[in-house]
Amino acid sequence: MPRTHTSDRLDPHVRPPALQRWGRVTAARSRLVVWAGVALAVLGLVLAAGTMNRLVLSRFETPGSESVTTRAFLEKEFDAGTPSVLLMVTAKQGTVDGEAVASEGRALERELAGQDGVAEVFSYWSRGNSPAMRGNDGRQALIIARMAGTVTEARTRLADISPAFTREGAQVTVQVGGGDEIFRQAAEQSRKDFLRAEMIVFPLVLLLLFAIYRRISAAFLTLGMGLFSVITTLALMRGVTYLTDVSTFAANLALVMGIGLGVDYSLFVINRFREELRAGRSVPDAVEQSVAHAGRTVAFSGLTVVLSLAALLLFPFPFLRSFAYAGVATVLTSVFAALVILPAALARLGLKVLRKNEDERTRPAQGWWHHTALRMMRRPLLYGIPALVVLLGLASPALGLTFGVPGAQVLPRDVSSRVVQQQILDNFAAEEMSAIKVLRTGQAGTDANRASIDATAAELSRIAGIHQVDALTGSYAKGRKIAEPGESARRFASERDTWYSVVATHRTVAQDIDRAHAEIRTVAGRGAEGGAVKIGGYPAELSEFRAELVDRLPLVFGLILVTTFLVLFLMTGSVLLPAKAMLLNTLSMGVMFGVLVWIFQEGNLADLFGFTPSGSIEPSIPILMFCVAFGLSMDYEVFMLSRIKEEYDLTGDNAGAVAAGLERSGPLITSAAVILAASFATYASSEIVFLKMLGIGMVVVILVDATLIRAVLVPVSMRLAGQANWWAPAPLRAFHDRFGISESSPAARPAAATSDTAGAGVRAGRS
């Protein structure tokens, strides 16, 4: 006997909801809609072809911050910005002070200075044999450069400069390193990983879809929706690039989320379509009801993901905002594909999406998910407490989370720029590239101020963790002058201001930079009447970037929680269900952070996954992962609760609705999770640690969320709360009755069931 549908009992004089009307239109105009979708895909493909060339690279900096404005001031007034490229010169015989090696080094410096896009060059030899630029064994010295233009222009030029200056000469070996070279090579590798992921993810997802559907037509159709999302997302991203900068790494997110969400949403719509067909509906009616019911849930599920990803726009960093642009575009195109193109395609395919000899009578009334839910609800504490203990145990390493700064460890050990960086760490007492630039406005760099400049520089060199200080009056270490000023000291001179180059030790830069900055500001500010102290340099830029990220976290996380709570309330009409969803999703986020700390911060399984732990985690990637993972977790929450609510509206039986809702949604959620996890897993083998973190972390949180959270804790918490699941204060209930959304109509909702009725499903499970 066909199952009774809510829509069957609607008043024929009441105008159907908009989505139901749209489903009717797509079924009636299916050929036109399908061809329009094909035309959009072709147009998107043409536009997407030029997207990668318009994506840009980003530095870890906060626009408008003190360090960035100081850098701009130093570049304009002193022609002394923050360098980002270096040549490591290694003597084959003798030391870098030998005449032949020194001559070769000066020639390299002149050659590099003559390259297009190079704004400033200096070396060990032109800086008066500065100790900070000479290796401890005397065999290595540095040539340091600052590139002109934007970071994208600089790294584009480096693509030519780097191979040209990687040399084996008669006297010296030359290698290229520095921050821009490290992240240029990281971006280059990310593009390779993107192409490799494309080659893996499409056939892998197709095989998984065929295993789910057992129909090749349905598998190709679903994958086609994911491919449509990827193509049109890249096309939209190209449009965004004309308005603002979009990071090249955003394309990686567009690929995995486009496939994942495009497939997820299609799975839920196609599953509903097959249910309607098995229940005896005609193809047009099945399309109409699929869009009316599952389509509404897809739309609001997409809204939860959009809200989570849009929160990234609150960060003032082009890098993170790029992921918001890519993520929001991916959700919009996935929802469009699932609600516009897919229903029309289903109308064309009709019964071909069903397995052979499949109808409602061949399916068991109560499957594994139904029995599992009843089992969990019969003994909620017996199953719920162990599951909670396991999840809390997995999340516990997150208590030791330490945010750090990115470095060469993001690259594989054998990449040239990382090799150079390791040599600097091993053979140099400090890193000139990471010099802290201290601008003292109001203190003119003139002969009249030499005494005060000398005193300030000497005092700065006494600060713990400072290796060397260079100033107009010479070079200093441990409170005394170690070198008289040479020709290069003129760079500190100005009729109005002066600045100091403070070179910290490796340990101070990596672990204690905030303390060093505070002490430097105090020392440099003494006697600065009428002036000010500004701190710049690469360490300051990273420090301010990290601080701004952390400061904005409460606002971002709070906004995500509030907006998601509102969406779930509009769907369920309950106050408790959204609150429980927040807690369970926060628990799954804790598991993700716990795994990230255990693997990437503490270094467990580092050899297996092929990376070098740094003892800390760069903060922007985990924040991105939180926004993505939280949105996807709520995605599954929306699908599950919508089916539970639909059953509850039909029966008023809390426990029975949970079991029936899980039976309807559980297999789909598991299938969708496996496919989405497989998409992200393609980046687990990436050569870039950032992408490796994204892949492993997302796989863990998706699988945990779809198993222990959905299969155990959801039914357990629903059973323990009973009828309170559906409670809301009278004003909020009235608000929901008017503006809420669900997969059933208010007319079909029964009066609140008694507690005896709510337990009927559990008791039935005992019999």
Image: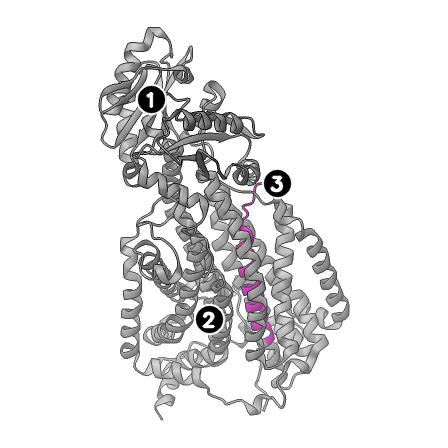
- The x and y percentages for residue 344 are 70, 70
The magenta span reads 245-270
From the image, which quarter does the N terminus lie in?
bottom right
- Residue at x 64% of width, y 86% of height: 280
Q: Residues within 10 Å of mark 3 (few under 14, many from 20)?
A: few
- Residue at 55% across, 34% down: 150
On the rendered structure, is 182 left or right of 503? Answer: right
Determine which residue is flagged by label 3. 243
Residue indicated by mark 1: 470
Query: The disc labelled 1 sits on which kind of residue?
Result: Asp
Q: Is residue 219 left or right of residue 605?
A: right
Q: CA distance from mark 3 to mark 2?
A: 39 Å
In-front residue for pair 744/705: 705
Q: Pointer 2: what residue?
A: 641
Comes first in the chain, label 3 or label 1: 3
**Image location (x, y in percent) of residue 253:** 52, 55
Residue at 67% over, 52% down: 49
Residue type for callout 3: Leu
Q: Secondary structure at mark 1?
A: strand
Q: Is residue 183 magenta?
A: no
